[in-house]
Image (cartoon, grey):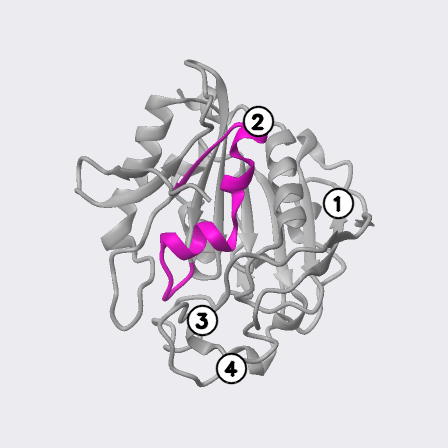
Amino acid sequence: MAEPNVAVDEKTGRKYFLEQPDDLKPGEPVVFLLNLHGGGSHGTWQRLYFPAFLYKEKYRLVIASPSAATKEPARRWVAEADDAHLRNIVEHVLATYNVRSFWLVGHSQGGMTSNRLLTDRFYIDRVDGWLSLSGGRIGPIELPPEFFVPVRSTLPADANQPAPANTPRPGRAAMLEGDHHFIFAVGEHEMVALPETSPWAEKYGAAARVRQPDVIDSEPGLIFDTMRDGRSNKSWGLKPRPGTSQMWIYPNARDGKVIADVVRIDKGHTEGLEPKITELLVRMIAEAPAGKVAAAA
């Protein structure tokens, strides 16, 4: 596996991973993913948890995987410390590449950070879609008590430290005013049950959800929470294993909006995504209607 390219934010001096197709041609259209890790984690872990880079050639992806600056009591995205850096990354990518589609991707607290960023006009005007990887579902969802296991860890640590005041837990994301696609992917054991309806689907007048063929992975994901190896639980996540993912889409949404729920059977919060479900999510992103970046230019 090739080492990722390391880029530098010239305004802050902070480093981040920035990957593109090896055979990218000048001016070729690309899909841009801003890939945000969860609390207690970092960019290296996140790019393995959601290994979209494996498909950067096939789907013409540019992927930025940064790390949050705040490390105490656990590394997590904080507006005052990170928002300018994230915007610098986005502005650099939009100025450097011919971006036809821009998606936020976030795991756990990175997903909740995506939810927060999508209240900012800069992102509202540019983001085509949000892939929430156990990072909050728009609308009600209940997390089981065992999700918040009382075990100290450093990678990742969303459940080890109490959330700051007024910070939503990763189960439920705030309803948004923006206009974008929304895909929610979650492990079976990190929720009580998946709701059968979606407020985001209702916003776009979509029909009732439709079950899609299961995605069966014979290969495991690339990463897990190594700091809890041997003392975790099914809700938080075990070691990577092959698996099956169930998917529902909400069809006929206005303006072709892609709205979907994915449940990874017998998986928890920190087990890295398997290759086939990763590719399916990437393909959905690449094929979704786009155009907001060009409109904002």
Hey, which residue is sitting farthest front in the picture?
1
Q: Which residue is mark 1?
A: 250
Q: Is residue 46 magenta?
A: yes
How many other residues sit within 10 Å of disc 1, few (<14), some (14-19) or many (≥20)? many
Q: Which residue is mark 4?
A: 230
In the figure, 115 relative to 267: above or below? above
Choose the circle earlier in sequence order: 2 or 1.
1
Q: Nearer the viewer, residue 144 or 276?
A: 276
- What are the residue bounds of the magenta stretch? 38-64
Q: Position of residue 288 (x, y in %)?
A: 63, 31
Taking the spot 52% from the left edge, 80% from the top edge, the residue there is 232
Q: Which residue is mark 3?
A: 226
| Residue 161 quadrant | bottom left
Taking the spot 68% from the left edge, 61% from the top edge, the residue there is 242
Taking the spot 71% from the left edge, 55% from the top edge, the residue there is 218
| Residue 4 quadrant | top left
Query: Marks 3 and 1: which is nearer the front?
Result: 3
Q: Nearer the viewer, residue 297 or 39?
A: 39
Q: Amino acid at mark 4?
A: Gly
Q: Position of residue 297 (x, y in %)?
A: 39, 20
Q: Nearer the viewer, residue 284 or 170?
A: 284
User: Viewed as shown, does residue 155 lie left or right of 134?
Assistant: left
